[in-house]
């Protein structure tokens, strides 16, 4: 059965300006998958998957295969035929066979396609972003923090677990001043005892939160008894059930939400609606940033006005190149929507071809 839709799945990679160093490893480029869904009237919906291979997740070849199979799935065809075209929903039979990055790409593309057909005027407010600093020698990290500060950033996220963490935090605090907010991201590199010791040392320096300091919700529950610094989930909180467990355990006070990690916009909103949250990039390309900005704007709405936190969506600054002709624009630390219908992202075809894998 024909859906009137065609799928194109394009794996590609973007190089970083500088190596991206974390406690989980070092990347010189980010491999991603662009999904293009076209209807029989020539409209195109864009989606994007970011395989989280450093976290032990699926690789890019698996994501490509999953999306190609989804495009030819009888279940998907039946669902689209029954609904008026493209409700932004993925039938359960298809969704159950997809990894979270692939599900994110598919749901994003359907949202983009639906809005290009029907229109959507709800997404206009810019969102405030944090600076993202890769691990390194304290002096180098502090110098990079100063460059972000000069461009208007007020919240700084440091990748820790790669060296002298306390010295790095101290150097950045001296560089950005007392008013700036500093958050840490350990990527679960610390043991419980290491985390307690390091957080005790940096607490006087003024830390907004520390993301995934330890590996499990149970360890975070114990660590929360030993520090006044907010603990933020990342790897430990993927589903709504994970969020509920974290709340019951009095472990993480807040969580970062990465759409490629949780499976897309709607699943991300489930988690973000349950726990105090900020939206973070999985080092996404332009399409992933555009849909993530939507969730960040939703979190910045009046219903969450007292809980606003800077979002980790300024990571396009980390890349040396882009595949986009139009994309979300950073002005200072504010991320604005991309112009145009749907998500507003358009593709630079020559650049995509150059970066295709």
Image (spheres, rainbow, N blue to C red):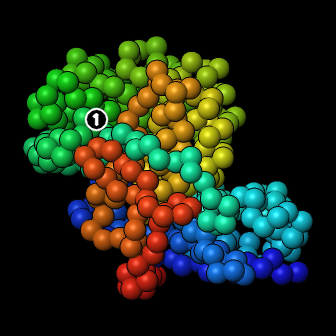
Position of 127 with respect to 19 (left or right) is right
Q: Which residue is located at x 56 percent, y 51 percent?
A: 121
Asked which quadrant contains residue 249, the reply is: top right
Q: Residue at x 38, y 36 (%)?
A: 310
Q: Position of residue 38 (x, y in %)?
A: 65, 77
Q: Position of residue 281 (x, y in %)?
A: 44, 51
Pick the residue in front: 268 or 207. 268
Give the residue pinned by disc 1. 155
Between 250 and 128, the one lying in front of the other is 128
Residue at 11% in and 30% down: 174
Asked whether residue 134 appears in the rendered view, the answer is yes
Residue placed most toward the observer, 151 or 339: 339
Task: Indicate left or right for 308 with 172 as reference.
Answer: right
Mark 1 neighbour density, 10 Å: few (under 14) some (14–19) many (20 or more): many
Q: How many marks?
A: 1
| Residue at x 56% of width, y 61% of height | 342
x and y, in percent, of residue 195 in the image: 37, 28
Quarter location, residue 112: bottom right
Q: Is residue 153 left or right of residue 284?
A: left
Q: Quadrant of the N terminus?
A: bottom right
> Is residue 245 shown above or below 62?
above
Disc 1, SS:
strand
Residue 206 image position (x, y, % from top left): 25, 21
Residue 170 visible in the picture: no
């Amino acid at each position: 059965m024909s859906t009137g839709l065609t799928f194109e799945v394009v794996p590609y990679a973007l190089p970083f300006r500088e190596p991206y160093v974390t406690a989980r490893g070092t990347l010189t480029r980010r491999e991603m998958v662009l999904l293009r869904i076209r209807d029989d009237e020539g409209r195109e919906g864009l989606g994007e998957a970011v395989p989280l291979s450093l976290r032990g997740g699926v690789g890019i070849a698996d994501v490509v295969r999953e999306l190609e199979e989804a495009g030819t799935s009888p279940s998907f065809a039946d669902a689209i035929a029954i609904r008026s075209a493209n409700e932004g929903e993925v039938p359960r039979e298809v969704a159950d066979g997809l990894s979270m990055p692939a599900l994110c790409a598919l749901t994003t593309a359907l949202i983009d396609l639906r809005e290009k057909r029907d229109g959507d005027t709800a997404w206009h407010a810019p969102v405030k972003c944090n600076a993202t600093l890769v691990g390194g020698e304290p002096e180098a990290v502090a110098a990079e923090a100063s460059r972000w500060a000069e461009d208007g950033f007020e919240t700084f996220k440091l990748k820790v677990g790669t060296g002298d963490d306390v010295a790095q935090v101290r150097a950045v605090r001296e560089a950005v001043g007392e008013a700036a907010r500093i958050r840490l991201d350990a990527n679960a590199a610390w043991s419980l005892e290491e985390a307690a010791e390091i957080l005790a040392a940096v607490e006087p320096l003024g830390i907004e939160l520390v993301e995934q300091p330890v590996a499990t919700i149970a360890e975070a529950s114990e660590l929360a008894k030993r520090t006044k610094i907010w603990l933020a989930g990342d790897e430990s909180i993927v589903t709504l059930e994970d969020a509920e467990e974290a709340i019951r355990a009095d472990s993480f006070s807040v969580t970062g939400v990465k759409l490629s990690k949780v499976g897309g916009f709607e699943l991300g909103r489930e988690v973000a609606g349950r726990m105090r949250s900020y939206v973070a990039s999985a080092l996404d390309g332009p399409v992933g940033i555009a849909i993530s900005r939507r969730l960040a704007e939703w979190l910045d709405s009046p219903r969450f006005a007292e809980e606003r936190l800077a979002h980790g969506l300024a990571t396009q600054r980390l890349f040396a190149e882009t595949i986009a002709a139009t994309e979300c624009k950073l002005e200072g630390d504010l991320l604005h929507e991309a112009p145009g219908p749907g998500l507003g992202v358009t593709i630079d075809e020559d650049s995509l071809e150059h970066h295709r894998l």
